[in-house]
Image: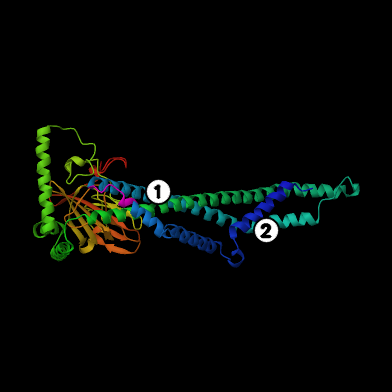
């Protein structure tokens, strides 16, 4: 009598094929086309996870109330904004890692499905052999001794065929078990991504409320700000280079000129305090969150500055920019709609579009240093405003084909460009970045 384990393996193998192929298997002749269709459907589902997250009006009201109940002093608002900004970046990083794991699982799932579909002929042979054996079982030698010769012949044939059948069926069943495990792991990863996406939506709402609260406390009138922004736009059209733009802004726009004067005054005050203290101990943080000017000079902030966005560095300083020149900054491929934080303390001396850079943000960090951020879709700070390292200042765009040659934005993925300048010349920003995300950026 045929080993029952072989029958069980064959049944599992049949289930494997049906499970891999799905309801449309009979309608799709090309396994590759079927796998591609399934992959596209899963990718669309993955993209819908984060996009479908929407906070209810009740939850938004709770968040607004939470912000209103904060101690409204500057330090508390700044620290809350920085802490929330750090959480947003951490969640963006986690979601990106989850997407990477999901994509790897999907590729493995596709490979197993393709393997199962490619073994349809093998499964057909296994099932056909079982069916033939079922219709014509080997004779029972103890019941009919005259069939002894037929029994011997059947035993010889089964001894040759059954091991191969079992091996093929077991291989198919093993693939099925692996496929089931992959689908369960995919479900867990999607649940994790859904949870993180919900937290991200809440923290982004917090950031928006905190920014609105902070901007509401600004002194400049809307009319004054609009006039200065108009003047800045006109100067940007006239400027021939970034160096020229910065010089024109800090000379001809009141808010930028005031920012430059405040940066110089703060630098002089720090220098005087350092001479009195006569200390050479490197700073361990950038200071308390209620500071109105940098507590640490930009030169001394090496190893303390946070990367402004979560993502993958695609081009480093001095690398070939693909246009026959060397990159004067670094480029980071970010998630769509990623948050951008200020990498340093400083005053906003320009915020708006500029040539091929797209939307550009220039921060006067004092001591002749400027920090440039480009490639954003939305800027949330104003001319002349003082910002802290780690404070949310902008948002990246949704994925789209964009081109900004000087900024290396030729991708369907948003790319943030960061450049450090000293006395008008670009410098390598690598020594300034904090070694870990745990470095303090405020308070």
- Residue 69 among magenta residues: yes
> The C terminus is located in which quarter?
top left
Secondary structure of the residue carrying tag 2 is helix
Other-residue count near label 1 (Cα within 10 Å), few / some / many at <14 / 14–19 / ≥20: some
Q: Residue furthest bottom?
A: 27
Indicate which disc residue 124 carries: 2
Asked if the residue at tag 2 contacts the one at tag 1, i.e. Cβ–Cβ closer than 8 Å, the answer is: no
Q: Nearer the viewer, residue 295 or 406?
A: 295
Residue stretch rendered in magenta on the structure: 66-73
Query: In the picture shown, does residue 30 fall above or below 418?
Result: below
Secondary structure of the residue carrying tag 1 is helix
Residue 87, image x, y percentages: 35, 47
User: Can I make out residue 231 in this image?
Assistant: yes
Of callouts 1 and 2, the N-terminal one: 1
Residue 345, image x, y percentages: 20, 47
Q: CA distance from mark 1 to mark 2?
A: 45 Å
Indicate which disc residue 294 carries: none
User: Can I make out residue 376 in this image?
Assistant: no
Of marks 1 and 2, the one in the foreground: 1
Indicate which disc residue 94 carries: 1
Q: Nearer the viewer, residue 152 or 165?
A: 165
Secondary structure of the magenta portion, mostly?
A: loop
Q: Nearer the viewer, residue 186 or 138?
A: 186
Residue 349, image x, y percentages: 16, 55
Residue 102, image x, y percentages: 47, 52
Q: Residue at x 24, y 39 (%)?
A: 285
Other-residue count near label 2 (Cα within 10 Å), few / some / many at <14 / 14–19 / ≥20: few
Query: In the picture shown, does residue 28 fall above or below 7?
Result: below
Residue 338 figure quarter: bottom left
Left or right of 8, for residue 344? left
Left or right of 23, for residue 278? left
Residue 298 figure quarter: top left
């Amino acid at each position: 009598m045929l080993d029952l384990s072989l029958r069980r393996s064959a049944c599992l193998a049949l289930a494997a094929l049906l499970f891999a192929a799905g309801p449309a298997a009979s309608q799709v002749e090309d396994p590759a086309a079927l796998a591609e269709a399934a992959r596209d459907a899963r990718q669309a589902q993955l993209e819908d996870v984060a996009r479908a997250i929407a906070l209810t009006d009740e939850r938004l009201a709770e968040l607004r109330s939470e912000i209103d109940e904060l101690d409204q002093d500057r330090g508390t608002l700044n620290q809350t904004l920085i802490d929330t900004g750090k959480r947003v970046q951490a969640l963006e990083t986690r979601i990106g890692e989850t997407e990477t794991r999901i994509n790897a699982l999907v590729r493995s799932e596709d490979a197993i499905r393709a393997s199962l579909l490619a073994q349809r002929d093998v499964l057909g042979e296994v099932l056909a052999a079982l069916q033939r054996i079922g219709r014509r079982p080997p004779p029972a030698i103890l019941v009919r001794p005259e069939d002894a010769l037929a029994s011997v012949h059947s035993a010889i044939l089964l001894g040759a065929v059954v091991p191969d059948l079992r091996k093929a069926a077991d291989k198919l069943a093993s693939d099925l078990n692996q496929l089931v495990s992959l689908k369960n792991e995919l479900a867990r990863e999607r649940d994790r991504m859904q949870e993180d996406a919900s937290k991200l939506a809440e923290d982004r709402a917090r950031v928006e409320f905190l920014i609105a609260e902070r901007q509401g406390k600004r002194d400049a009138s809307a009319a004054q700000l609009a006039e200065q922004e108009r003047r800045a736009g006109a100067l940007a059209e006239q400027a021939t280079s970034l160096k020229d733009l910065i010089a024109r802004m800090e000379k001809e726009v009141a808010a930028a000129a005031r920012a430059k004067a405040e940066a110089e005054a703060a630098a002089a005050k720090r220098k005087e305090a350092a001479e009195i203290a006569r200390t050479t101990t490197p700073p361990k943080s950038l200071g308390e969150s209620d500071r109105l000017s940098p507590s640490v000079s930009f030169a001394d902030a090496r190893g303390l500055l946070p990367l402004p966005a979560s993502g993958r560095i695609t081009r480093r300083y001095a690398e070939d920019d693909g246009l026959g020149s060397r990159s004067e900054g670094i480029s980071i491929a970010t998630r769509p709609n990623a948050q951008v934080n200020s990498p340093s303390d400083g005053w906003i001396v320009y915020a708006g579009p500029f040539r091929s850079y797209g939307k550009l943000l220039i921060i006067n960090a004092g001591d002749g240093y400027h920090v440039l951020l480009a490639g954003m879709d939305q800027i949330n700070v104003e001319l002349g405003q003082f910002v802290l390292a780690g404070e949310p200042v902008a948002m990246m765009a949704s994925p789209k084909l964009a081109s900004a040659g000087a900024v290396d934005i030729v991708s369907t993925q948003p790319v943030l460009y960061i450049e450090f300048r000293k006395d008008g010349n670009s410098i390598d920003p690598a020594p300034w970045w904090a070694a870990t995300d745990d470095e303090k950026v405020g308070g």
